[in-house]
Image: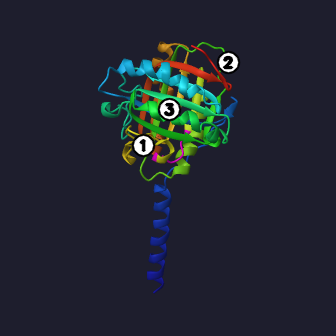
Amino acid sequence: MKTVTAILLLSFFAGVNSFSQIAAPKPTKISTAIKSEKHLSSSILLWMRTDKPRQEGMDRWKGPHSKIISANKGLWEYRQIHLAETNTGLWTSITGVETTIPQDRKIDGIADVTLKGFLSLLRGREQNKLAFKDEVNLFKRTILYAAFPKNSRWYEMTEPNTKIEARSIVFFRIKEGVKEDDFKKFIMEELTPMFANTGVLKELRSKAYSPWKESQWNTPDVLHDNAKEVQFQASLLLGFSDKTAMEQFFKSEAVKKLSDRISIFCSAVHAYEIEETLTFVRDGMQISH
């Protein structure tokens, strides 16, 4: 009987040991001396209508449509991120992670919106109504992701007027089975500080999004199809001194070394090249173009 009991105890502890060995890795908190600001923000992903020339839609977006949005008194900042038409993915291949951008879901642009505060959600209602009506004239699909201040940070990488000649925005999709809290900590407390510490970036903004809800931006006559398997849960905006620096960054050993960690928490990493970044509201003030 004692022998049987001993065997059972050994089996139990062996099982506990095996479980601890296969337990999911946790994010590691990385320190950085670079200061950051918290903001209430959103990223509205945009696809241009395909029954019209793409450039026609892009021009209307930065023309008449921008005036509708920038008149919103609740905005702290409003930027348009115009993505290059040819975008297959800047991130190097990672085993088990989708780094090639599927062309049937390739994004054309992002409305990068930062609010003055939570009351801005009420102050912007009238302008939003006008924007809703105009969307069908240029957009095929619009998807809004929101980020609360805890999960939306701007890092002070350089002096405010430093010239940035190249940018990329990287979207991340959570891996199945990973806890949402662990994923957010990986993006905000591990990956972003590691990028901040590279010494290469001239701009760095991180967002870990709240769960997507169609009701947050449900404009009429425009698609909002966003199945779970194509949703994103985070993004990083990266700024560089020039295009060469950006290309070297994505080919660097520093980025390659991140692959193992990324594969634990992410199922997709889509790194887009940004063609143009236009600012229409800065520090709560409209900027004329």
Measured as percent of width and height from the top left, residue 244 is found at 47, 13
Measured as percent of width and height from the top left, residue 77 is found at 62, 27
Q: Which residue is mark 1?
A: 231
Mark 2, other Cα within 10 Å: few <14 / some 14–19 / many ≥20: few
Q: Camera-side residue: 24 or 220? A: 220
- Identified at 66% across, 19% down, the residue is 158
Magenta region, mostly helix, strand or loop?
A: loop
Can residue 223 be seen? yes
Q: Which residue is mark 2?
A: 160
Specify which label sits upstream in the sequence, 1 or 3. Answer: 3
Q: Is residue 234 above or below residue 65?
A: below
Look at label 1 and name its amino acid.
Answer: Gln
Extent of the magenta region: 208-214
Splitting the image into 4 quarters, where does residue 56 fall?
Answer: top left
Secondary-structure class at tag 3 = helix
Position of the C terminus, as image quadrant, is top right
User: Disc 2 and disc 1: Cα gap in Å?
Assistant: 32 Å
Secondary-structure class at tag 1 = loop
Measured as percent of width and height from the top left, residue 147 is found at 57, 41
